[in-house]
Image (cartoon, rainbow, N blue to C red):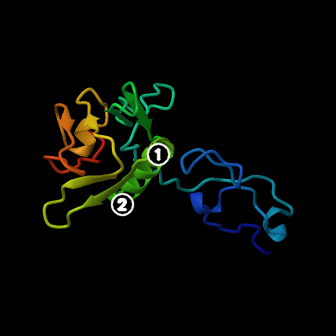
């Protein structure tokens, strides 16, 4: 008698393209022989990683935690305090810098300014270097302030703002 059991490992890497995320996904078995003459499927083991977004939009439905994804800048060119939002997600420091710089430049470039964000490998401090005629103030009321590494308002001196403390992208600030 031949066994009708077949063992297949399925992970979030196998998820269908229309799946929502790595924690909310659907898998379609594409192997014909794996789906022929199947009476039932038994799940033997499930491993669920316990990972939460370190950058959150504060949406309680998603369970992301308090918002920490908004940086608020003020300047004469902006006319009023302007918020820069990055999408909630799990970021490493390089991804975080790239996402924030891209969002800021979308707004600043039409105003004749751009920003480059760099991280010092020794001190781990972030530097925001602005090109353009405007002078910017980072507002301490930004939910992203502790993530970036500052507590109160910071005014640009010269072309750069060096953030006083290292960034904290742990997601628990």
Of all residues, the one furthest to the bottom in this rendering is 2
Residue 171 image position (x, y, % from top left): 30, 42
Foreground pick, 8 / 117:
117
Q: In the displayed structure, would residue 36 be above or below residue 127?
A: below
Which one is earlier in the sequence, the residue at label 2 or at label 1?
A: 2
Q: In the displayed structure, would residue 69 be above or below residue 1?
A: above
Residue at (33% x, 45% y) in the render:
133
Foreground pick, 21 / 161:
161
Residue 136 image position (x, y, % from top left): 29, 38
3D distance between C-alphas at marks 2 and 1: 14 Å
Density class for disc 1 (Cα within 10 Å; few <14, some 14-19, many ≥20) is some
Q: Using the rendered view, name the quadrant where residue 29 is placed.
A: bottom right
Quadrant assignment for the N terminus? bottom right
Residue 14 image position (x, y, % from top left): 64, 62
Residue 135 image position (x, y, % from top left): 28, 40
Q: Along the horizontal axis of the image, is 79 left or right of 29?
A: left
Q: Along the horizontal axis of the image, is 97 left or right of 89?
A: left
The residue wearing badge 1 is: 103
Residue at (18% x, 39% y) in the render:
150
Q: Along the horizontal axis of the image, is 7 left or right of 137?
A: right
Q: Secondary structure at mark 1?
A: helix
Residue 56 visible in the displayed image = yes
The residue wearing badge 2 is: 94
Residue 91 visible in the displayed image = no
Density class for disc 2 (Cα within 10 Å; few <14, some 14-19, many ≥20) is few
Quadrant assignment for the C terminus? top left
Q: Secondary structure at mark 2?
A: helix
- In this figure, what is the number of numbered marks? 2
Q: Using the rendered view, name the quadrant where residue 33 is placed.
A: bottom right
Q: In the displayed structure, would residue 94 be above or below residue 105?
A: below
């Amino acid at each position: 008698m031949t066994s009708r059991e077949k063992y297949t490992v399925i992970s979030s890497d196998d998820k269908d393209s229309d799946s929502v995320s790595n924690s909310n996904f659907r898998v379609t078995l594409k192997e014909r022989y794996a789906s022929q003459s199947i009476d039932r499927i038994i799940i033997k083991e499930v491993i669920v990683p316990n990972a939460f977004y370190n950058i959150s939009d504060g949406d309680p439905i998603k369970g992301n935690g308090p918002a920490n994804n908004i940086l608020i800048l003020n300047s004469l060119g902006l006319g009023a305090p302007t918020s820069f939002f990055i999408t909630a997600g799990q970021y490493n420091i390089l991804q975080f810098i790239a996402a924030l710089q891209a969002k800021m430049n979308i707004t600043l470039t039409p105003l004749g300014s751009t920003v480059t964000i760099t991280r010092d490998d020794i001190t781990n401090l972030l530097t925001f270097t602005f090109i353009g005629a405007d002078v910017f103030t980072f507002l301490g009321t930004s939910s992203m302030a502790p993530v970036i590494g500052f507590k109160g308002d910071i005014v640009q001196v010269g072309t750069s703002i060096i953030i006083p403390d290292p960034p904290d992208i742990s997601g628990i600030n």
